[in-house]
Amino acid sequence: MTQLTSEAAARSQSVRRSLFWILGSGAFGLAFSITTTAAYLPPLLHRFTESGTLIGLVLGAEGVFALLLSPVIGPWSDTFHTPLGRRRPFMLAALGPMGFCLLLMPFMPNLWTTTLIVLAFFFAYYVYEPPYRGLYPDLLQSSTYGRAQGIQHVLRGIALGSALVGGGFLLKLWHAAPFVLAAFVTVGACGATILFV
């Protein structure tokens, strides 16, 4: 009996540990996408305008979406009941548009179409992000929050560093490369959270 209990505890610990990393993959994808956008969108927009104000307004629009969407999507995902659960329908709905917008960003012909794609990306990002954050209290005991957040921050740091360093090299090779890479990384990492949680 004692052996069975210890085996069950070991299995539970293993599942919990893997859950931390699977949950953290969402943070990796989000951090990679937003870092790529913040770092490599200005050179992209400089092809169309010399105005730092306009470029700042496009990038600053992220804050508007954060302020307007997060208070709506987060509580809505608390009360949303589907066979896929409460959070995953929102995350799933946002996943394709996030990847698609990142993929299209460097190929737009002018400032206004690029801006529309960037705004659509920010919209999708803040449809995915609040329900994703809601998964942590849904799935984890409060005693494990610190460890889970630690893993999340490690993955965010890796995403930030790799997006900045790797994207810089890729940008020299081809102006679209950082965005194409970010599209695949974001869909893969954020999709893993949806699929495996």
Image: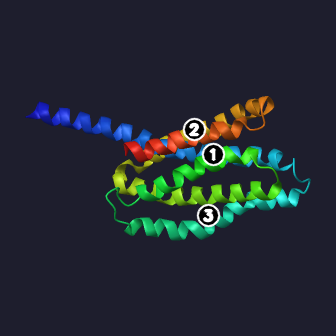
Which residue sits at x=53%, y=55%?
A: 94
| Numbered mark located on residue 66 in the image | 3
Location of residue 3 with respect to 67 vertically, above or below:
above
Q: Amino acid at mark 2?
A: Val
Q: CA distance from mark 2 to mark 3?
A: 22 Å
For this view, does 150 lie left or right of residue 57? Answer: left
Marks 1/2 in contact by CB < 8 Å: the verdict is yes
Quick one: which residue is furthest to the right in this view?
50
For this view, does 82 lie left or right of residue 64? Answer: left
Q: Amino acid at mark 3?
A: Ala
Residue carrying label 2: 185
Location of residue 83 with respect to 162 vertically, above or below:
below
Which residue sits at x=47%, y=47%?
A: 149
Where residue 167 sits, quadrant-wise, is: top right
Q: CA distance from mark 1 to mark 3?
A: 15 Å
Q: Nearer the viewer, mark 2 or mark 3?
A: 2
Residue carrying label 1: 33
Asked whether 5 or 197 is in front, the reply is 197
At mark 1, the secondary structure is helix
Q: Residues within 10 Å of mark 2 (few under 14, many from 20)?
A: some
Instruction: Say if residue 174 shows up in the picture.
Output: yes
Q: CA distance from mark 1 to mark 2?
A: 8 Å
Q: Amino acid at mark 1?
A: Ser
User: Residue 148: percent from the left, percent from the top?
Assistant: 43, 45
Location of residue 78 with respect to 50 vertically, above or below:
below
Where residue 159 sits, quadrant-wise, is: top right
Which of the two labelled residues, at mark 2 and mark 3, occupies the earlier sequence position? 3
User: Residue 135: percent from the left, percent from the top?
Assistant: 41, 54
